[in-house]
Image (cartoon, rainbow, N blue to C red):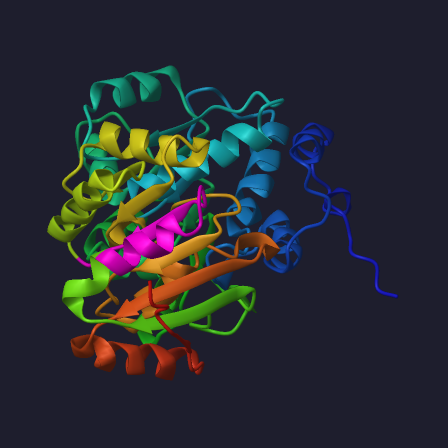
C-alpha cells in the first residue's frame, strides 16, 4: 500500500517542522507534495491549483527555510517578495509566515493600500526578510525610497490570474523590471488561460509546470445545488435557508455592494448575526467582520467578489450565491471557500429567471449539471 510522505522528507528545518506538527498537519496536500521539492531546488515554477488546496504552504515553507538558513542575510535585506492581488490574501499569507516561522529569526511584514502607510513604512525601516505586498502600494513606497529590490532572490506571484483580471498587469511588469535578473520566480494561478500562459512565459525561466485538479472544476467534496426563485423572493428564501440550520456559518455572495448592504440590514432585522464585507468598507471594518466570522461571533458574512479569493476560513460548511456571478470562473472561486483541504462543504445558488444564462455558462465551464432543489412549503 502506498504510504504518504511526511513534511520531514523535504529537508525543512526542524523548527519549521515543529510549527507544522503543532498545527496538526501530518501529510502534505497533493500540490504541496509536488511543488515543495521544486521550490527547495531553486527552480522556477508555474503551478496551477484551485483555492483550498494548500498552495500557500507551497512557497511559505521553502522560503522560510531558505531565509533562516542563509547566514549572509542581514536584517535590512529583503530577500523575498510575495506579490498578491488583495489585502485579504496578503494578510492570510503573512499569518502563514508567522505561523510556520514562529520559531525562526525571520522578519516578515505586509503592505497594502487603503490604510495609513506610516506604520508600514516604520516596519520597513526596521528591516524585513520577506515582504508580502499588493502592487499599487509597493510601487508607491518604492518611489518614495522606502523599498529596495536589489537583494531579492525569490519572487512569488500568487493568484496571478486574479491580478490580471484586476488590471495589475502594468504594475506587475514594472515591478519585475526592477528586480535582479538572477532570481527564482514562483507563479501560482487558479486558472490557466492563454493570457496566463503568455504572462508566465514572459516572467519565468525554464519553469517546472505543475497542475493539480482539473481546470475550472470545483472540488469534488463540495455538494452543489440550485433553487429557482423569483428575484423578489430571494431574500425570504435566503433567510429560510439560514434559519433552518441554527448556528451554521454561511458565506453569502452578492453581485453588488448595494445589495450586500441591503441583505445585511434585512438579515439583521430577522435576528441573524451578520456583517458585510466589500470594497466600500474600510480595511479595519473588513478585518473586524472577518475576525468576528472566524471566531463565531457572527454566523453570516455577506460579501461581494472581493472575498471570493484570499479568505482562509477553516471548515466553512456552506456558501450561498444570492446572485450568480457574471463571469462563470468566479463561481468556482466563490464556492472554493468551502470544501477546503479535504473537508466537505455545500454550495447553494439562488437563480432567478434572468440568471439562467449565467447558470448555463457555469455548468458548461465546470461540466457539471447542478442539482435542482425544491422549495418546501411552510
In the image, is residue 224 above or below residue 361? above
For this rendering, which residue is in front, 136 or 306? 306
Image quadrant containing the N terminus: bottom right
Residue furthest left in the image: 258
Pinpoint residue 18: horizontal percent, then vertical percent: 71, 29
Residue at position x 19%, y 23% in the image: 116
Q: Write the residue at 22% across / 26% down.
A: 145
Q: Is residue 309 above or below residue 23?
A: below
In the image, residue 67 sits, relative to residue 247, either above or below, namely: above
Is residue 29 rendered to the left or right of residue 160?
Answer: right
Residue appearing at x 70%, y 39% in the figure: 12
Start-end of magenta stretch: 236-255
Name the spot of residue 13 as percent of width and height, x first.
70, 33
Corner quadrant of residue 128: top left
Q: Position of residue 332 (x, y in %)?
A: 39, 66
Quarter of the image where one finds residue 371 = bottom left
Image check: 214 left or right of 89?
Answer: right
Does residue 80 appear in this view? no
Is 301 included in the stretch rendered in magenta?
no
Residue, far front = 378
Q: Nearer the viewer, residue 93 or 359?
A: 359
Q: Is residue 179 left or right of residue 145?
A: right
Q: Would residue 302 appear left or right of 291 to someone viewing this image?
A: left
Residue 232 seen in render: yes
Q: Residue at x 33, y 71 (%)?
A: 227
In the picture shown, does residue 136 fall above or below 320? above
Residue sitting nearer the eye, 235 or 124:
235
Looking at the rendered structure, the number of numbered marks drawn on it comes to: 0
Residue 246 among those drawn in magenta: yes
Q: Where residue 330 appears, x then y in whole percent?
A: 31, 65
Instruction: Tell me the quadrant of the picture where the C terminus can be found.
Output: bottom left
Amino acid at each position: 500500500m502506498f504510504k504518504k510522505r511526511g513534511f520531514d522528507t523535504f529537508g525543512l528545518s526542524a523548527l519549521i517542522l515543529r510549527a507544522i506538527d503543532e498545527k496538526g498537519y501530518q501529510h502534505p496536500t497533493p500540490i504541496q507534495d509536488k511543488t515543495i521539492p521544486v521550490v527547495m531546488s531553486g527552480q522556477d515554477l508555474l503551478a496551477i491549483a484551485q483555492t483550498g488546496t494548500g498552495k500557500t504552504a507551497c512557497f511559505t515553507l521553502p522560503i522560510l527555510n531558505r531565509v533562516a538558513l542563509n547566514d549572509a542575510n542581514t536584517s535590512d535585506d529583503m530577500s523575498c517578495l510575495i506579490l498578491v492581488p488583495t489585502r485579504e490574501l496578503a494578510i492570510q499569507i503573512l499569518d502563514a509566515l508567522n505561523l510556520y516561522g514562529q520559531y525562526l529569526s525571520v522578519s516578515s511584514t505586509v503592505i497594502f493600500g487603503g490604510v495609513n502607510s506610516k506604520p508600514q513604512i516604520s516596519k520597513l525601516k526596521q528591516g524585513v526578510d520577506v515582504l508580502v505586498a499588493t502592487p499599487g502600494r509597493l510601487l508607491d513606497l518604492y518611489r518614495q525610497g522606502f523599498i529596495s529590490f536589489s537583494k531579492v532572490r525569490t519572487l512569488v506571484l500568487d493568484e496571478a490570474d486574479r491580478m490580471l483580471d484586476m488590471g495589475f498587469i502594468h504594475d506587475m511588469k514594472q515591478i519585475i523590471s526592477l528586480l535582479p535578473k538572477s532570481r527564482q520566480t514562483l507563479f501560482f494561478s487558479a486558472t490557466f488561460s492563454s493570457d496566463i500562459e503568455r504572462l508566465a512565459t514572459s516572467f519565468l525561466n525554464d519553469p517546472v509546470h505543475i497542475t493539480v485538479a482539473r481546470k475550472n472544476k470545483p472540488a469534488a467534496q463540495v455538494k452543489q445545488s440550485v433553487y429557482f426563485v423569483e428575484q423578489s423572493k430571494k431574500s425570504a428564501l435566503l433567510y429560510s435557508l439560514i434559519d433552518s440550520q441554527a448556528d451554521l456559518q454561511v458565506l453569502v455572495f452578492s453581485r453588488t455592494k448595494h445589495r450586500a448592504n441591503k441583505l445585511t440590514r434585512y438579515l439583521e432585522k430577522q435576528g441573524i448575526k451578520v456583517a458585510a464585507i466589500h470594497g466600500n468598507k474600510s480595511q479595519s471594518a473588513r478585518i473586524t467582520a472577518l475576525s468576528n466570522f472566524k471566531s463565531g461571533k457572527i454566523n453570516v458574512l455577506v460579501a461581494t467578489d472581493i472575498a471570493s479569493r484570499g479568505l482562509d476560513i477553516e471548515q466553512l460548511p456552506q456558501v450561498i450565491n444570492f446572485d450568480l456571478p457574471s463571469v462563470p470562473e468566479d463561481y468556482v472561486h466563490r464556492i472554493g471557500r468551502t470544501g477546503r483541504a479535504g473537508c466537505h462543504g455545500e454550495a447553494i445558488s439562488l437563480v432567478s429567471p434572468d440568471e439562467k444564462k449565467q447558470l448555463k455558462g457555469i455548468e458548461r465551464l465546470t461540466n457539471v449539471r447542478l442539482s435542482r432543489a425544491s422549495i418546501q412549503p411552510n
